[in-house]
Image (tube, rainbow, N blue to C red):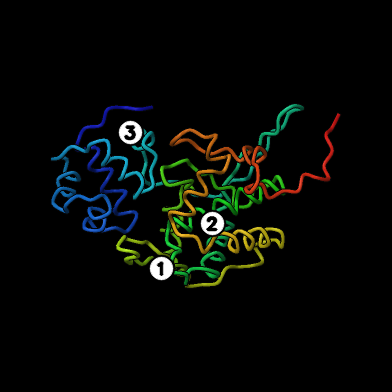
């Protein structure tokens, strides 16, 4: 449910999201091209936020505008594992993903082990590598890899609850967050401090992830974002809404990763 936020409420939410991302006021101000004092006034509720600034904030902080403006906005996501639920009827395949937190953490660690050292692999690239790993696996096997939900945001699909999981992993000494400058832009990077538990990954899961990394891990943040914007699940979803895994079955070349040639239509 949407509501009209006061300047003070908006400022409080911006400050909470910024801190959860591990950004200083200076970092965030530079990213949205305003001065640090201006951001301070926004967070204190003494300055309004125009539409362009709000859009820029949503990109940098990774939130949906609808969620941000909602009266049930909650910065503290629940990331307890839940069992995947599948509901089917005779006509339609409906698969409801349930986040497997341990699997998500191991997939994230594995991806970081393989490519965290590449200078292009900041948070934006990482989000897209996770997205294509999850959605490619679902297209091929009709099963969820991590069960993460992804939302359509301006720079491409973003896994929900990522910041909360990242926070848990940093607290447990599994990864480290660092901030660097890459081509004069702030880049958030993650370094693995422990190895992924490969017993948590099936051979088929590792194979799909490896192919995604081989194909996409060398792309820049802009290039991989633009590529994701041409994928059918992104195209067919509305801004700010969750992206349905079922849309992978409407993919076309070069995004489709499943060989449909040997499949016959049921009569």
234 sits left or right of 154 in the view: right
Q: Secondary structure at mark 1?
A: strand
Residue at the (70%, 33%) spot, across then down: 93
How far across and down, in percent of the image, does residue 166 sit?
44, 58
The numbered mark at residue 69 is 3
Residue that protrudes farthest toward the right in the picture: 267
Q: Secondary structure at mark 3?
A: loop
Q: CA distance from mark 1 to mark 3?
A: 31 Å
How far across and down, in percent of the image, does residue 7 sit?
19, 36
Q: CA distance from mark 2 to mark 1?
A: 19 Å
The earlier-in-sequence mark between 3 and 2 is 3
Q: Are marks 2 and 1 in contact (CB under 8 Å)?
A: no
Q: Secondary structure at mark 2?
A: helix
Tally the numbered discs.
3
- Look at the picture and state if 63 lies above or below 184: above
The earlier-in-sequence mark between 1 and 3 is 3
The residue at which mark 1 appears reads as 176
In the rendered view of the protein, which quadrant contains the C terminus? Answer: top right
How far across and down, in percent of the image, does residue 118 sit?
47, 70
How packed mark 3 is, by other alpha carbons closer than 10 Å (few <14, some 14-19, many 20 or more), is some
């Amino acid at each position: 449910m949407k509501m009209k936020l006061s300047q003070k409420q908006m400022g409080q939410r911006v400050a909470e999201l910024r801190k959860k991302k591990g950004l200083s006021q200076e970092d965030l101000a530079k990213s949205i091209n305003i001065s640090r004092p201006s951001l301070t006034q926004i967070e204190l509720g003494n300055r309004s936020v125009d539409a362009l600034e709000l859009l820029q904030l949503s990109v940098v902080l990774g939130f949906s505008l609808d969620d941000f403006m909602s009266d049930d906005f909650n910065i503290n996501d629940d990331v307890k594992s839940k069992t995947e639920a599948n509901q089917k009827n005779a006509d339609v395949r409906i698969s409801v993903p349930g986040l497997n937190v341990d699997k998500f953490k191991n997939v994230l660690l594995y991806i970081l082990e393989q490519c965290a050292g590449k200078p292009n692999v900041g948070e934006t690239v990482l989000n897209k590598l996770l997205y294509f790993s999850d959605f490619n696996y679902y297209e091929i096997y009709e099963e969820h890899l991590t069960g993460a939900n992804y939302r359509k945001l301006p720079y491409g699909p973003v896994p929900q609850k990522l910041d909360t999981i990242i926070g848990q992993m940093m607290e447990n000494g599994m990864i480290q967050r660092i901030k660097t400058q890459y081509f004069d832009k702030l880049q958030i990077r993650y370094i693995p401090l422990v190895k992924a538990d490969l017993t948590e990954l099936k051979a088929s899961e590792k194979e799909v992830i490896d192919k995604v990394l081989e194909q996409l891990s060398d792309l820049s943040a802009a290039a991989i974002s633009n590529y994701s914007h041409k994928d059918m699940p992104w195209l067919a979803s509305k801004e700010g809404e969750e992206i349905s895994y079922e849309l992978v079955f409407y993919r076309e070349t070069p995004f489709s990763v499943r060989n449909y040639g040997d499949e016959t239509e049921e009569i």
